[in-house]
Image (tube, grey):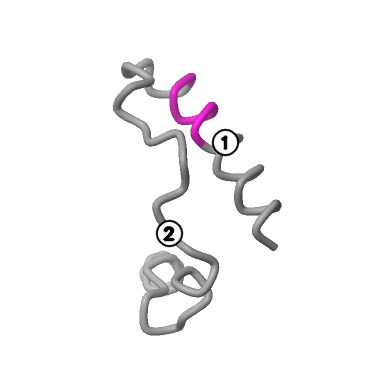
Amino acid sequence: MTKALETTWGDGRDLAIRETGLDPDLFPEDNPFSAEHLLDPDNAVWYSLAWDVRT
């Protein structure tokens, strides 16, 4: 799981840099969130965002 998070963070960072054209230094190279934090429903911002899109 940790390796997958590292890989997807880097891929997402690269995509964000390409899509926004912003300075790469604005995007953290290392994922600031732990797997536990991301999987904790109390911290699941993505769930809230996905719910807002569906409503």
What's the residue at 39%, 52% (across, down)? 32
- Residue depicted at x 45% and y 83%: 41
Q: Amino acid at mark 1?
A: Gly
Q: Name the residue at 61% across, 46% down.
A: 6
The number of numbered discs placed on residues in the rendered structure image is 2
Location of residue 27 with respect to 53 vertically, above or below: above
Q: Residues within 10 Å of mark 1 (few under 14, many from 20)?
A: some
Q: Which residues make up the magenta segment?
A: 13-18
Give the label on residue 10, or none.
1
**What residue did someone put label 2 on?**
33
Observer-nearest of 8 and 29:
29
Estimate the x, y position of residue 52 in percent, counting from the top left. Answer: 36, 70
Prevailing secondary structure of the magenta residues: helix
Looking at the figure, which quarter contains the N terminus?
bottom right
Q: Is residue 44 left or right of residue 14?
A: left
Q: Position of residue 14 (x, y in %)?
A: 53, 27
User: Looking at numbered disc 2 in the image, what kind of residue is underneath it?
Assistant: Phe
